[in-house]
């Protein structure tokens, strides 16, 4: 069985013609480049947000901008643009690409071009690099995702805080590689205490006896879609718990699903060779998908 990814999308020829916003200039895809001295390319020194366009509206835009500016503050990075200016740049890029719905945006800010190829932030003297990259993107995941538990952890905040949406993703990439080597699509990562935590790219939920469980959130990216699912559960009398739980709890779950901006709620059919529930999308996941669609549809 071929591997799939949680960001798999339908092929769209229009993406060859997209224009990409780089520091105030819209450039054709083939010409959209940054310097080899850029802090993001050289050291992974940058932050980003992924946004989704539904029927003319960038979903949860305020929450994404909140997180971006909080991340910039955390790493002492001056974005060099106000929220209003960044929002207008987003809309400008959307208009230039004629996008109305089923589009995905990767908004990236790095510390900018360095004067010399070393890590000290003071060597980034030219100001930040801001990139707004959009694609026509309709998710196309042909079957439930298969996960494999890997030894890589999403760890403690004094190493690299997993709540920070940074360009430094090697830990998650290594986890994904390990899962692929094990014949799975994505990695299930534990926290520092051995409890089930997250995947390398998405937040993770299970359903047991009608109750929705997810991790405490202490060691994972506190995703915006993750929080919206928790909120939807609470608003619709679906029991939900942010708690520690083990692989034993997970293998015995009735359903499992992933959350993320791109795929919303993606069903999980298999974990470490164990079929979860019936191996297909379960009723609670279906209900949450319907509730989420109502939430994001204007």
Image (cartoon, rainbow, N blue to C red):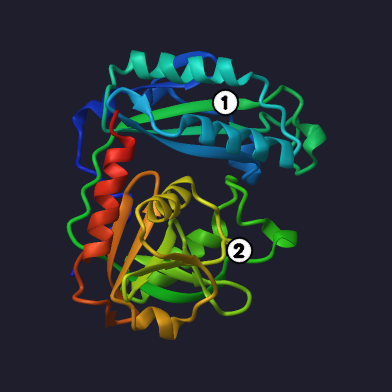
Horizontal and vertical percent position of residue 77: 72, 33
Kindly identify which residue carries mark 2: 219
**Residue 99 visible in rendering:** yes
Label 1, label 2: how many angstroms apart (C-alpha)?
28 Å
What is the quadrant of the N terminus in the image? bottom left
The residue at 51%/38% (across/down) is: 49
Image quadrant in which you'd find residue 18: top left
How many marks the image carries: the answer is 2
Q: 152 and 259: which one is in front?
A: 259
What is the quadrant of the C terminus in the image? top left
Bin the neighbour count of mark 2 within 10 Å (Cα to Cα): few under 14, some 14-19, many 20 and up. Answer: many
Q: Is residue 214 left or right of residue 207?
A: right
Kindly identify which residue carries mark 1: 130
The residue at 28%/17% (across/down) is: 98
Q: Is residue 169 above or below residue 45?
A: below
Horizontal and vertical percent position of residue 80: 68, 20
Horizontal and vertical percent position of residue 265: 32, 54
Q: 129 and 276: which one is in front?
A: 276
The residue at 53%/70% (across/down) is: 243
């Amino acid at each position: 069985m071929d591997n799939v990814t949680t960001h798999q999308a339908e092929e769209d020829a229009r993406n060859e013609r997209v224009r990409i916003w780089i520091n105030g200039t819209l450039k054709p895809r083939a010409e959209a480049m940054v310097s080899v001295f850029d802090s993001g390319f050289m050291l992974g020194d940058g932050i980003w947000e992924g946004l989704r366009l539904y029927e003319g509206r960038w979903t949860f835009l305020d929450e994404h901008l909140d997180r971006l500016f909080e991340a910039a503050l955390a790493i002492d990075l001056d974005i060099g643009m106000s929220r209003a200016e960044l929002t207008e740049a987003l809309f400008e890029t959307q208009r230039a690409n004629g996008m109305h719905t089923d589009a995905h945006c990767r908004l990236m800010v790095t510390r900018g071009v360095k004067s010399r190829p070393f890590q000290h932030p003071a060597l980034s003297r030219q100001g930040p690099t801001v990139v707004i990259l959009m694609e026509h993107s309709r998710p196309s995941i042909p079957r439930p995702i298969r996960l494999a538990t890997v030894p890589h952890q999403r760890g403690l905040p004094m190493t690299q805080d997993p709540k920070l949406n940074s360009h430094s993703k090697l830990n998650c990439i290594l986890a994904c590689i390990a899962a692929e080597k094990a014949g799975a699509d994505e990695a299930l990562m534990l926290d520092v205490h051995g409890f089930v935590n997250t995947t390398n790219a998405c937040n993770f939920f299970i359903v047991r006896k009608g109750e929705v469980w997810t991790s405490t959130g202490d060691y994972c990216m506190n995703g915006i879609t993750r929080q919206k699912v928790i909120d939807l559960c609470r608003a619709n009398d679906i029991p939900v718990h942010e708690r520690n739980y083990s692989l034993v709890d997970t293998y015995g779950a009735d359903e499992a699903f992933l959350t993320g901006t791109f795929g919303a709620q993606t069903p999980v059919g298999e974990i470490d060779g164990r079929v979860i529930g019936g191996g297909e999308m379960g009723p609670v996941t279906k209900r949450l998908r319907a509730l989420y669609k109502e939430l994001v549809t204007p």
